[in-house]
């Protein structure tokens, strides 16, 4: 059985992947993506980001995102919709001008209204706010924070809840996979939203790990549980584990253990609903383009052989 079928046996959890529409013409890759035995959930890698959905003010383009969602639906997969309010992947029309508090809130509400309404009923969850906390636990000084103030976060959740009351609303971030100042900041953020009565249903731990800096199984269980204690569900949402290129055997062994530990940590925390990998095929991974000198982060090598990490996940389940 494939990874999703095995996860399903663990109290109905899912195993999912990110997918970019850029690769939809690769039939081998597409057949693996749409294998629901392998993947029960899909996250659009880029097509729902602001620069893709509203490239010009008030001009919405859902062509790529609709294709993403359609491929998942054909395969009977749920969709983790990603993402609405982020400092990255913003179109020039937003970043190249100064906004008042009032005009930027209006821009935010219109975007959320159009995008969330368009996908209403199709998203298992929305990553409403992505990466809002600094390493020291303070709020990241994004255009949203600098213009609107920290209230932008609660506003965003309230807006999404208004336009799609059924989607689960997530906070998603990286660097929160073990207890540190950033994790404590994210915990405080979610706790604050909860105390204010804002609808927040889940926390996503991204999980982009270079092998030498990956969290242990215990770290991950602890952090997933700490978030769960706030009364939300949790998930690992963007798992990939990268090695130095050229690849060394010891690092592949580390990668193997880290993948298995990460999946096992989710299964051992009752509130953890699933694990999503950020792609599954090395040649299409975002890692080499973003982290020079690193790569081979995914579960399948370029020749489509499954890595030891794949078998280790199977054994861990
Ligand atoms: C990445 C994509 O994988 C790349 O293709 C793109 O160029 C940049 O964004 N955290 C996130 C994801 O929440 O949206 C990012 O995805 C990876 C880091």
Image (cartoon, grey):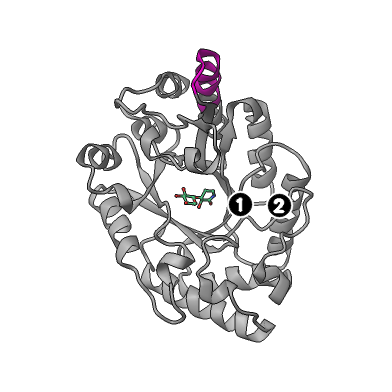
Percent position (x, y) of residue 316?
47, 21
Is residue 252 magenta-colored? yes
Is 50 in front, or is 124? 50
Q: Mark 2 points at which residue?
A: 186
**Kind of element beneath mark 2:** helix
Which residue: 50% across, 69% down?
91
Q: Name the residue under label 1.
A: 232
Label 2 CB sits under 8 Å from any ligand 1 atom? no
The image quarter containing residue 97 is bottom right
**If the image is split into quadrants, where does the N terminus sit?**
top left
Q: Main secondary structure of the magenta part?
A: helix
Is 284 displayed left or right of 241 in the figure? left
Which residue: 37% across, 40% down?
284
**Whether residue 267 can be seen here:** no
Region in magenta: 246-259
**If the image is split into quadrants, where does the C terminus sit?**
top left
The disc, 1 or 2, on the residue closer to the chain's N-terminal end is 2
Percent position (x, y) of residue 123?
40, 60
**Kind of element beneath mark 1:** loop
Is residue 219 magenta-colored? no
Residue situated furthest left in the rendering? 27
Q: Is residue 218 above or below residue 55?
A: above
Mark 1 closeness class: few <14, some 14–19, many ≥20 residues within 10 Å: many
């Amino acid at each position: 059985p494939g990874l999703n079928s095995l996860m399903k046996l663990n109290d109905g959890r899912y195993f999912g992947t990110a997918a970019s529409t850029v690769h939809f013409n690769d039939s081998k890759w597409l057949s693996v993506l749409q294998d629901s035995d392998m993947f029960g959930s899909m996250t659009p890698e880029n097509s729902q980001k602001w620069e893709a959905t509203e490239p010009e003010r008030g001009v919405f383009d859902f062509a790529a995102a609709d294709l993403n969602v359609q491929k998942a639906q054909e395969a009977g997969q749920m969709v983790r919709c990603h993402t609405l309010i982020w400092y990255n992947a913003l179109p020039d029309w937003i970043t190249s001008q100064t906004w008042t508090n009032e005009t930027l809130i209006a821009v935010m509400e219109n975007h959320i209204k159009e995008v969330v309404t368009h996908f209403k009923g199709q998203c298992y969850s929305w990553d409403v706010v992505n990466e809002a906390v600094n390493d020291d636990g303070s709020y990241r000084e994004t255009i949203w924070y600098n213009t609107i103030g920290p209230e932008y976060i609660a506003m965003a959740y309230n807006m999404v809840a208004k336009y799609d009351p059924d989607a689960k609303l997530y906070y998603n971030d990286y660097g929160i996979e073990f207890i540190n100042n950033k994790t404590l900041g994210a915990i405080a953020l979610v706790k604050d939203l909860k105390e204010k009565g804002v609808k927040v249903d889940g926390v996503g731990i991204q999980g982009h790990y270079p092998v030498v800096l990956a969290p242990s199984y215990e770290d991950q269980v602890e952090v997933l549980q700490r978030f769960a204690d706030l009364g939300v569900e949790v998930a690992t949402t963007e798992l990939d584990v990268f090695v130095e290129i050229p690849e060394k055997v010891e690092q592949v062994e580390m990668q193997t253990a880290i993948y298995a530990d990460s999946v096992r940590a989710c299964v051992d925390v009752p509130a953890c609903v699933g694990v999503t990998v950020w792609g599954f095929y090395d040649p299409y991974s975002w890692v080499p383009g973003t982290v020079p000198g690193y790569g081979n982060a995914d579960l399948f090598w370029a020749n489509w052989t499954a890595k030891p990490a794949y078998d280790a996940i199977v054994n861990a389940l």
